[in-house]
Image: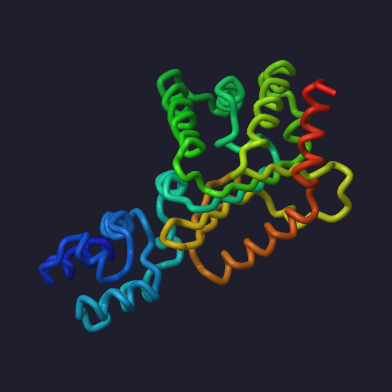
């Protein structure tokens, strides 16, 4: 990825174009061009072919992409996720073990990081916590992204941080559920069919209408930009939403779990 990014920068400079000038010709954002040149974002074959034509590279970038090992086409997960969250026009999230990161209270987030093993040292712990809280500024953006979340009911029953910590987190979720741009649904425990048994996922559509998916597991995480795979994950998420409680029923459940009804 670093090599392909360096090639892109070389051909752009050879063509006497700045990043903003190339972005305008390609109808892309400057941030996307910069990320690809720095090797932080994969260059998709369709984009490579388009850039080859604009920069008259005789197909050099497309040829490089076609020979790239699949694992090299995965950018650093955390960098890619943070970057694309910040420029999301829509974000859809399914979580099965904990409350999604963007919806966590600081108290709950501290408890979640406290569960890490091996444990973080103090400096690392505070850095991760600070980054998580800063990411929640996305909820204050104008205009905000359209958001939807499906959370397993078990995540709302597991008393991470203690029962009072969980109760305050659930009250926070109930308040967030009233935001006009955010839809929150709980997947009930007694559901007999479930489209998300393969695990959590995050789906993002960027301001440039690019669709991406993120998947995390025990041994790491990947960014998916293959249109066919992303489309299947969007279909899966649509089914998850249909299987979960409605936003109205979710609000009533949250009030019950928080002891307010």
Q: Residue at x 51, y 68 (%)?
A: 226
Where does residue 129 sit, x and y in percent of width and height?
48, 26
Above or below, comparing residue 260 to residue 79 in the picture: above
Q: What number of labels is visible?
A: 0
Whole-percent x, y for residue 215 in the image? 57, 52
**In the image: residue 228, left or right of residue 64:** right
> Is 9 situated left or right of 198 in this image?
left
Q: Nearer the viewer, residue 127 or 164?
A: 164
Image coords of residue 145 (percent x, y):
51, 48
**Near-viewer residue (83 or 246):** 246
- The location of residue 122, given as percent across then percent down, is 44, 18
Q: How is the image coloured?
A: rainbow
Q: Say left or right for 81 vs 3.
A: right
User: Would you place residue 222 above or below residue 106 in this image?
Assistant: below
Residue 11 quadrant: bottom left
The image quarter in which residue 249 lies: top right
Task: State the residue at coordinates (81%, 21%).
Answer: 260
Residue at left offset 85%, top offset 55%: 193
Identify the image quadrant of the C terminus.
top right
Vertical comparison of 131 with 17: above or below: above
Looking at the image, which residue is at 59% across and 34% down? 103
Image quarter of the N terminus: bottom left
């Amino acid at each position: 990825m670093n090599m392909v990014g360096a090639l892109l920068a070389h051909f752009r400079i050879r063509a006497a174009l700045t990043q903003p000038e190339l972005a305008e010709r390609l109808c892309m954002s400057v941030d996307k061009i910069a990320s690809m040149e720095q090797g932080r974002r994969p260059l998709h074959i369709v984009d490579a072919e388009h850039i080859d034509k604009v920069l008259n590279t005789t197909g050099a970038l497309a040829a490089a992409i076609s020979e790239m090992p699949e694992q090299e086409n995965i950018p650093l997960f955390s960098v890619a996720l943070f970057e694309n969250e910040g420029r999301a026009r829509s974000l859809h999230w399914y979580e099965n073990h904990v409350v999604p990161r963007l919806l966590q209270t600081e108290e709950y987030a501290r408890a979640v990081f406290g569960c890490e093993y091996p444990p973080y040292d103090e400096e690392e712990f505070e850095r991760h916590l600070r980054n998580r809280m800063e990411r929640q500024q996305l909820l204050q953006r104008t205009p905000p992204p359209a958001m939807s979340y499906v959370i397993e009911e078990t995540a709302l029953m597991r008393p991470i941080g203690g029962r009072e910590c969980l109760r305050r987190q659930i009250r926070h979720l109930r308040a967030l559920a009233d935001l006009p741009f955010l839809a929150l649904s709980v997947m009930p425990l007694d559901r007999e069919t479930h489209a998300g048994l393969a695990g959590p996922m995050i789906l993002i559509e960027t301001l440039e209408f690019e669709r991406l998916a993120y998947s995390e597991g025990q041994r790491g995480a990947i960014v998916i930009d293959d249109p066919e795979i992303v489309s299947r994950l969007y279909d899966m998420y649509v089914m998850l939403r249909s299987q979960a409680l409605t936003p109205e029923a979710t609000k009533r459940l949250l009030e019950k779990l928080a002891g307010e009804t």
